[in-house]
Image (cartoon, grey):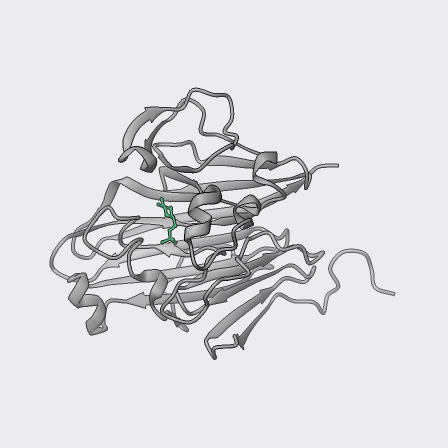
């Protein structure tokens, strides 16, 4: 009989699989059965499942997974630009690129690898396409890790490897899977200023207690504390978003009209998703030659009875 808890033989596993388009994906599994799937296309986390097999991230049934189109769902990475705040395509190019698995990543001393399944990906500026549209030399190292308790962590390190400074914005565009948009509330953004994309990025101050939803929302909350929570009453679960180096929080739900206009999203699917992103947008990050920036996002789930 197996003892309760984790048996000695069970170890975290990291496997390479392919999707229907032949794109490489990485499957992380922990000894309790929780899993995370990441695509090399965009370095995008596509799935995060509990040990019971419940999917915690939303992906549209109409998502287009053919590169270079980013998948509508999971956690696309917006880099080096957020939205249309710059001359690049919407949300920058990182989510459209094929990332590489990195066998010998630079040391990450703060990382405790015990009982974790993790993978290191890298995006470099070496291809002509990238340098033509964004003429800076960078390396973007991404470690995605799944812990024994099911927590998902993304650690990004962006390094300037050229002799000229550059600046960038970043967002982990996290599509949480929710029971119903009218059943959720977001806590941790009270009294903050935000830029409202629905009003030409005008600045407002959040008045209410917690954020609830009854129409389209497209905002960047500024200088938030490092923990934000998404409560889902119907599913009796709460997502905790812990972040470091990411002062801003994007909150996005397209509601019915915008959802209808998106070719890769079902008309009613907006009810079952909410994007809450750890981000650095209002004050872009400046990197001098040789400098490196680190940002960390940790997602966890709390179940209530
Ligand atoms: O359709 P995309 O490019 O993935 O972007 C989705 C949304 O992302 C949000 O973060 C933006 O603020 C919205 O304006 C945008 O519509």
User: Which quadrant holds the N terminus?
Assistant: bottom right
In the image, is 124 to the left or to the right of 276?
Answer: left
Percent position (x, y) of residue 180? 61, 41
User: Visible in this render: residue 132?
Assistant: yes
Percent position (x, y) of residue 294? 34, 50
User: Which quadrant holds the C terminus?
Assistant: top right
Q: Residue at x 72, y 56 (%)?
A: 52
Percent position (x, y) of residue 272? 57, 46
In the image, is 297 to the left or to the right of 79?
Answer: right
User: Visible in this render: residue 113?
Assistant: no
Q: Residue at x 43, y 70 (%)?
A: 40
Residue ranking furthest to the left: 164
Up-down relation of residue 247 to residue 128 (above or below): above
In the image, is 53 to the left or to the right of 181?
Answer: right
102 or 263, which lies in front? 263
94 or 11, which lies in front? 94
Q: Quadrant of residue 61?
A: bottom right
Q: Quadrant of residue 197?
A: top left
Q: Residue at x 41, y 22 (%)?
A: 191
Percent position (x, y) of residue 80? 27, 54
28 or 110, which lies in front? 28
State the count of labels: 0
Residue ranking furthest to the right: 1
């Amino acid at each position: 009989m197996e003892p309760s808890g984790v048996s000695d033989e069970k170890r975290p596993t990291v496997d390479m699989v392919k999707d229907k388009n032949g794109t490489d994906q990485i499957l992380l599994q922990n000894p309790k059965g929780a899993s995370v799937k990441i695509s090399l296309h965009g370095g995008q986390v596509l799935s995060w499942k509990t040990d019971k097999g419940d999917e915690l991230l939303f992906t549209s049934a109409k998502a287009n997974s053919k590169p270079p189109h980013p998948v509508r769902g999971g956690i696309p990475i917006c880099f080096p630009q957020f939205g249309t705040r710059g001359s690049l395509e919407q949300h920058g190019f990182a989510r459209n690129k094929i990332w590489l698995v990195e066998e010998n990543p630079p040391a990450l001393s703060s990382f405790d690898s015990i009982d974790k399944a993790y993978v290191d990906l890298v995006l470099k500026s070496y291809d002509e396409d990238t340098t033509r549209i964004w003429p800076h030399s960078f390396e973007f190292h991404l470690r995605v890790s799944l812990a024994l308790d099911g927590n998902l962590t993304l650690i990004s390190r962006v390094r300037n490897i050229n002799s000229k400074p550059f600046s960038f914005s970043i967002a982990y565009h996290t599509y949480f899977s929710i029971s119903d948009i009218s059943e959720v509330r977001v806590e941790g953004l009270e009294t903050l200023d935000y830029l409202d994309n629905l009003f030409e990025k005008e600045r407002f101050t959040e008045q209410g207690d917690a954020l609830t939803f009854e129409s389209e929302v497209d905002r960047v909350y500024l200088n938030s504390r490092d923990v934000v929570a998404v409560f889902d009453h119907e599913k009796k679960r709460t997502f905790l978003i812990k972040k470091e180096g990411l002062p801003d929080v994007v909150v996005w739900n397209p509601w019915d009209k915008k959802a209808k206009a998106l070719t890769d999203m079902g008309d009613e699917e907006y009810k079952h998703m909410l994007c809450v992103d750890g981000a650095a947008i209002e004050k872009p990050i400046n990197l001098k030659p040789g400098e490196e920036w680190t940002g960390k996002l940790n997602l966890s789930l709390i179940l209530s009875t």
